[in-house]
Amino acid sequence: MDLQLKGKKVLVTGGSKGIGAACGHAFAAEGADIILVSRTAEMLKKTGDEIRSRHQVSVETFAADLAQGPARDETMKRFPDIDILVNNAGAIPGGSIMDLTMERWIESWQLKVFGYIHMTKLALELMKPRKSGIIVNIIGMAGPAPRGDYVAGSTGNAGLNAFTKAVGSRSVDFGVRVFGINPAATLTDRIMTLSRQRAKTMLGDENRWEETLGDLPFGRIKKPEEVAALAVMCCAPQVEYLSGAMIDMDGGGMFRR
């Protein structure tokens, strides 16, 4: 099936590695032009060069700390004509309610929670007059399936789930789709960090991190490329009616407990 994404301009936040980099590759494979944004210029350049070489599309990179409001403003002013925004940047720490100070909560929500909200608002302001555009929020299964040892992330994800549904229910009035994906554990640096932290707390040994992942569907952890493939497919005009929705991508794991 031709997903009809050739020539579309796609901005991916947190685009230097993990799910973000996989999204860059997946959209580029469909002929889209890619903009990667993250904090680290060196890693962005490496990923950008890989995408450009493999898929022969236009790739731009922009180093920005999207935990900061002015950086979000600057990013969207620099790339006002994007067709698709993929919100993916975020690193909320693990820990229970007693483990995290309020300062840590507020700091950690600046990138993923407020960053997603602000980037969505800025993109909608640009897309509304054109009456077209798509915003994809990569959030996480801790929203619909909260964990006490990941309370800040669970709470932030749950809020972003509600935000995505609320905004996406009305954005269609001016031709813009907003939807989200909740990936379960995915083989990224991020999940390794959280799992090692959880293993140290629960088992006293961070090297036993795989044991904290539980009874995994298909007997394995999910790959970033699988999340990226879903995001790309859902951006195709053939599924235009998808908006104001969250897709739980956990292999049914939430119901195996």
Image: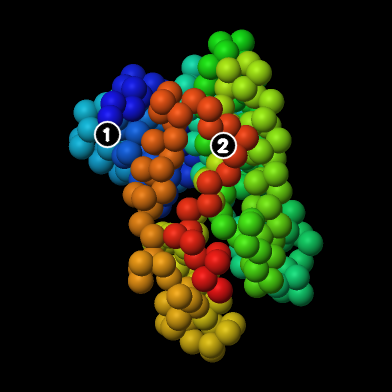
Q: Amino acid at mark 2?
A: Phe
In the rendered image, which quarter contains the N terminus? top left
Query: In this orientation, which residue lies closer to the viewer: 106 or 213?
Result: 213
- The residue at the point 71 percent across, 57 percent down is 155
Q: Residue at x 56, y 54 (%)?
A: 140
Residue found farthest to the right = 102
Q: Write down the quadrant of residue 36 in the picture.
A: top left
- Locate residue 230: give its quadrant: top left
Report which residue position mark 2 lands on.
Answer: 179
Q: Amino acid at mark 1?
A: Ala
| Disc 1 target residue | 29
Q: Cβ–Cβ below 8 Å for labels 1 and 2?
A: no
- Dot 1 or dot 2, earlier in sequence: 1
Q: In which image quadrant can residue 65 be found?
A: top right
Q: Secondary structure at mark 1?
A: helix
Q: Is residue 216 above or below residue 65?
A: below
Residue 40 x %, y %: 45, 45
One can see residue 79 in this view: no
Point 28% across, 26% down: residue: 2
Whether residue 140 is visible to the viewer of this picture, yes or no, is yes
User: Mark 1 Cα within 10 Å, few/some/many (few <14, many 20+)?
Assistant: some
User: Secondary structure under badge 2?
Assistant: strand
